[in-house]
Amino acid sequence: MHEASVVEELVRLLRTKAEELHATSVRRVTLVVGELTGYMEESLGFYYEILSRDTLLAGSELVVTYVKPKLHCESCDALFERSLYSFDCPTCGRPGSMTKIGSEFYIESMEAELPDDEPKPA
């Protein structure tokens, strides 16, 4: 349920950008979301649909690309995904430490319809 406030801010940012561009509508928004955020695509989509109603974003497609968390091995400098029940590096077997990879949440792109123009990414 914590997706509601995040999507509310997301919609606010997208509306502001669309208005700055003098967009007539928005067709697609692409987000990059780290799995560690816990944000569920279904919930993001649900709140996005509700909160974007009666705005330039209404009816636009929300595309979510997830990023798997990565660990870093201090011993061999490998970057790797954690395997089930283990934080050990698959290269050298030493324990890895968490990185910030997998905690992302940002707008990758917004495809907007501009006046007398073709859709362009923003």
Image (spheres, rainbow, N blue to C red):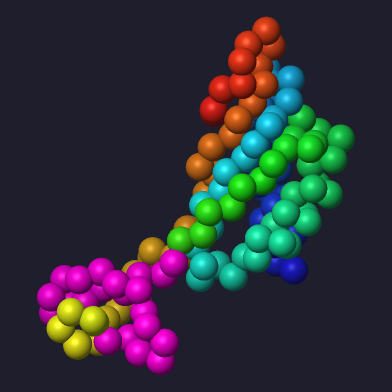
Q: Position of residue 26 (x, y in %)?
A: 69, 30
Q: Is residue 34 above or below residue 119?
A: below
Magenta span contains residue 14: no
Q: Position of residue 69 (x, y in %)?
A: 41, 70
Q: Is residue 78 above or below residue 95?
A: above
Q: Position of residue 57 (x, y in %)?
A: 74, 35
**Left or right of 51, for residue 44:** left
Q: Residue furthest left?
A: 76
Quadrant holding the C terminus:
top right
Task: Name the residue located 73 percent from the left edge and 62 percent from the top edge.
Answer: 43
Quadrant holding the N terminus:
bottom right
Task: Name the residue located 21 percent from the left edge and 77 percent from the top edge.
Answer: 73
Q: Is residue 95 above or below residue 100?
A: below
Q: Position of residue 72 (x, y in %)?
A: 26, 73
Task: Name the residue located 54 percent from the left edge and 37 percent from the top edge.
Answer: 109
Task: Name the residue located 33 percent from the left edge and 86 percent from the top edge.
Answer: 87
Residue 5 visible in the displayed image: no
**Left or right of 71, for residue 54:** right
- What is the tally of numbered marks visible in this picture? 0
Residue 41 visible in the displayed image: yes
Magenta span contains residue 75: yes
Q: Residue furthest bottom?
A: 85
**Left or right of 98, for residue 17:** right
Q: Residue furthest top?
A: 116
Q: Residue furthest right?
A: 54
Picture quarter containing residue 115?
A: top right
Q: Which stretch did the figure color magenta?
A: 68-88
Picture quarter containing residue 60?
A: top right
